[in-house]
Amino acid sequence: GPCIYGTKTVSGLPENYVVFHCLSKEACRCWQKEKWNKLASALFEKGISVVEIGYENVIRTASPFYYNFCGKRPILEINNLIGNADLFVGVDSGFAHIANGLQKKAVLLLGKYRSFKRPMPYNGFFEKNAVLLYPQNGGTVQDLTPEEVIKVVLSKSPQKKSGQRIITGVN
């Protein structure tokens, strides 16, 4: 599978963070903005920092745990932001393929796409290691609920370094 080597830290970011990439060029691959904001809020409540990348930002917040790296950015900076993250959370996109090449822990929001009921657009690392979330009803990515995504993302997110365990709720 694809492999990318070498990342540098990006100044001004905490040691631990989750990267969000919320939008795809195709609307049918995008999860609703209000659902992304619910997910972000759930992470902020646990003290987990979120770095958002992409052309246009989706997260609307004044949280000190939010870092907006959206807009036109050098690809090397995006590579470094993803490479140093504890977790990549996103839709099917070019940035997800970069995360795959960097062998990043990831939660990918997928769904029915054209004639594919459960598309698997990745090989290599993601094929065996990423958490691929598909709606239980076989629908599009928009059918994923914030609750099911929050549960999975919190279970994969960085734990606080101070020894505190982050409790992610009861099943």
Image: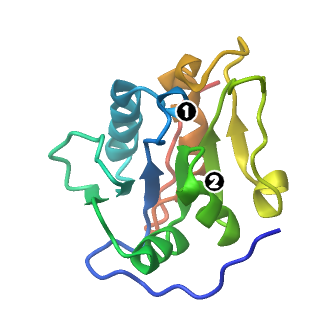
- Which of the 4 image quarters holds residue 162? bottom left
Three-letter amino acid code of the residue under disc 2: Ala
Residue 89 x, y percent position in the rendering: 53, 49
- Tell me, what colour scheme is on the image? rainbow
Whether pointer 2 and pointer 1 mark residues with C-beta atoms closer than 8 Å, the reply is: no
Above or below, 39 relative to 89: above
User: Which mark's residue is nearer the viewer, 2 or 1?
Assistant: 1
Determine whether the residue tagged by mark 1 lies in a helix, strand or loop. Answer: helix
Comparing 119 with 131, the one in front is 119
10 left or right of 152? left
Q: How many marks?
A: 2
Kindly identify which residue carries mark 1: 29
Q: Residues within 10 Å of mark 1 (few under 14, many from 20)?
A: many
Residue sitting at x 39%, y 36%: 42
The quadrant the N terminus occupies is bottom right
Which residue reaches farthest left? 62
- Which of the 4 image quarters holds residue 16? bottom left
Above or below, 55 relative to 145: below
Kindly identify which residue carries mark 2: 106
Residue 124 x, y percent position in the rendering: 83, 63
Q: Residues within 10 Å of mark 2 (few under 14, many from 20)?
A: many
Residue sitting at x 68%, y 63%: 100
Residue 31 x, y percent position in the rendering: 48, 29
- Which of the 4 image quarters holds residue 128? bottom right
Q: Which sits earlier in the primary sequence, circle 2 or circle 1?
A: 1
The quadrant the C terminus occupies is top right
Determine whether the residue tagged by mark 2 lies in a helix, strand or loop. Answer: strand
